[in-house]
Amino acid sequence: MPGFAYQPDPLPSNSSVDRQAAASSLGATGGTYFQDSRPIFIHMTNNTPIDRNAAATTSAAGAQPSTVFTNDVSRTVGNGPPSNLSVGAGPSRSVTNNSSDQQALTSASSTPRLRHLDSKATSSAAPLTGLVSQPPKGPQKKHKKLYLVLAGIASLVVVATAVAVPIALKKKKNSSASSSSASFTGGDGSTITTEKGTTFTYVNKFGGTWYDDPSDPFNNNAQAQSWSPPLSQEWDYQNHPMRGVNLGGWLVPEPLVVPSLFEPYVNSSPPVRDEWTLSIAMAADTANGGLGQLEKHYDTFITEEDFAQIAAAGLNWIRLPIPFWAVEKYPVEPFLQKVSWKYVLKAFKWARKYGLRINLDLHTIPGSQNGFNHSGKGGQVNFLYGPMGLANAQRTLDYIRIITEFISQPEFAPVVPMFGIVNEPLASTIGVDKLTSFYLEVHEMIRGIT
């Protein structure tokens, strides 16, 4: 298995880490390590390390734009009608049943053949009956010829029927299959019906196709654009430019990205400045739905149509920040636990439908990895540092393990090839040595799973 798919800047020159020892230790597993306060990305499936210089050269030489990630979702995607995740409803594909065709052949051919045998027996019985009266030889020969001609005509009719019936049945089934296929795949100008019953027109001028067959929910034939490989093929990190957009503010609301969620509680106590304090204020606001307001936000802020528009804009990757409480939280923590995981699964389904790949980003860490509001709780760092630093690091290892075990399954690995395990840890406070030890532990654990 490979090392990190995205490599941040090297360790600072004054680091106390034994670089050769760490490199040798990690080299034994086929990886490399670099560390600063930027997020670490672990590539889940590809065995080829990324050569960012080669990729940049390839991008500059080609006609396609270079790799870019942007936080400005509003420039790329619009708000469309909401959609639910359900693979149980929708049109089903008509599949030609070979056994039924064979049965049609049997029923269409066997009965006429029996009739043919009966007609021959009847034809031979008449002359035999006629021989009793010993008619003249001339008329008898004429009767024989007539019977033989009639028998031949009957045989031709039987053969024609036996051939025509199964062909007609097969054409009918092929026609049914063709009309059914239009309901689970399409390209530019096709109409998409969401699972909430709303519709929109798929507009993709770059040769992209969508695919959504309820009877085959893990099909990977969709393609974001003609130049982006479908999910059924490996991503070539040396030659395929990654053009992505960050879905910030969706499952990890931040005041800067979604101010409308925070503004109603600016005068609350304690003051709302992160999702910790927002959750406390919302839970007390039962008149407006309590914490249920967050799920309403999940359901409307990003929808299926946004994923279709991301592909239509020429992008092929999505960075999806998620909170640790999508998996679990402690009772003392005020977050809305596990509900956002339902929308993580929606994101996986929509990405598969439109041929997009996901860089899954564990954006929040128990105790806060940097003290910023987007870590879930602003203020002090309490990860690998502080009174609960080691305990929170152990919790983080558990959540990384759970998420890795899920996304590394064959059904999801093509959709989620990359996993960012910690977002922007504050190395100046935590310490590079501690972070390096943590990353090595995570690397060994993940490689043991994948």
Image (cartoon, rainbow, N blue to C red):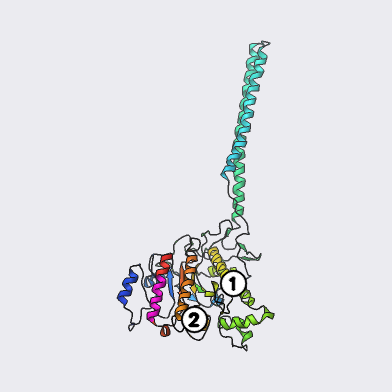
Q: Mark 1 is on which residue type?
A: Val
Residue count near mark 1 (Cα–Cα under 10 Å), binned few <14, some 14–19, many ≥20: some
**What secondary structure is found at the residue carrying circle 1?**
helix
11 to the left or right of 201 = left
Magenta region's main secondary structure?
helix
Q: Is residue 276 above or below residue 170?
A: below
Residue 362 at what x, y percent from top left?
Answer: 49, 74
User: Which callout, 1 or 2, points at the residue further toward the start of the chain?
Assistant: 1
Q: Is residue 352 visible?
A: yes
Say if the magenta span includes residue 437: yes
Extreme residue toward the left, this view: 20
Choose top left, top right, bottom left or bottom right for residue 191.
Answer: bottom right
Instruction: Identify which residue, 364 or 41, lies in the foreground.
Output: 364
Q: Mark 2 is on which residue type?
A: Ser
Q: Residue at x 41, y 65 (%)?
A: 448
Q: Residue at x 32, y 73 (%)?
A: 23
Marks 1/2: CA distance?
21 Å
- Residues tagged 1 and 2 counted as in contact (Cβ below 8 A): no
Residue 229 at what x, y percent from top left?
Answer: 47, 63
Residue 8: give its label: none
**What secondary structure is found at the residue carrying circle 2?**
loop
Residue 262 at what x, y percent from top left?
Answer: 60, 83
Say if the magenta span includes residue 144: no
Instruction: Identify which residue, 210 or 267, lies in the foreground.
Output: 267
Q: Is residue 18 above or below residue 404?
A: below
- Report which residue position mark 1 lands on: 339
Q: Which residues are magenta?
A: 432-443
Residue 368: give its label: 2
Q: Residue at x 41, y 66 (%)?
A: 447
Instruction: Identify which residue, 23 or 438, lies in the foreground.
Output: 438
Quadrant of image for the N terminus: bottom left
